[in-house]
Image (cartoon, grey):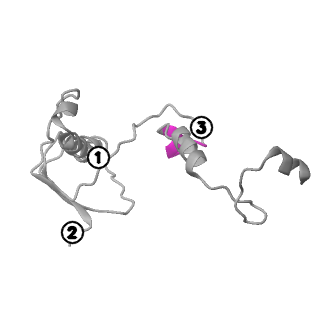
Amino acid sequence: MAENKLKIRGARHHNLKNLDIDIPKNKLVVISGLSGSGKSTLAFDTIYAEGQRRYVESLSAYARQFLEMMDKPDVDSIEGLSPAISIQQKTTSKNPRSTVGTTTEIYDYMRLLYARIGIPYCTNCGRKVSTQSVERICDS
């Protein structure tokens, strides 16, 4: 049975000095520390970079020829790594209503997806809403 954690051993990229760490999966994890202590290096340059590199490696040789080669982070091993995405760090949004969806610009795609595959229900009676002909609407 696989352990439910991401195991990083010997991370030495930028300010990381032979870091060994176990990060629990399926939990909210916060990486905090002083400026320059290696927080972004761990998150972006080590974990995310290795996730992307492994993804690109899984593509066919034909697909890989169109992508730039990715360097392996300076780390002895990373075990239990799931596919990774990264959200660009932006400080340009001053809107207090910004969400992960609006910041990543995925909100519009999700809206279209749910509009296509979603099943609408009446908020008053809870019955499934279906399309009706013009005649049926006029008769109601």
Assess whether residue 19 is covered by the magenta stretch: no
In this rendering, position of residue 105 left or right of residue 76: right
Q: State which tag comes first along the sequence, 3 or 1.
A: 1
Near-viewer residue (85 or 35) = 85
- Residue, disc 3: 95
| SS at badge 2 | loop
Q: Residue 42 in the image: x percent, y percent? A: 25, 47
Q: Which residues are magenta?
A: 97-103
Question: Disc 1 marks which residue?
Answer: 43
Rendered position, 95 above or below 3: above
Q: CA distance from mark 3 to mark 2?
A: 42 Å
Dot 2 corresponds to which residue?
2
Mark 1: amino acid? Ala
Extreme residue toward the right, this view: 139
Disc 2 marks a residue whose amino acid type is: Ala
Q: Residues within 10 Å of mark 3 (few under 14, many from 20)?
A: few
Look at 31% across and 50% down and name the residue there. 33
The amino acid type found where label 3 is placed reads Asn
Disc 3, disc 2: CB below 8 Å? no
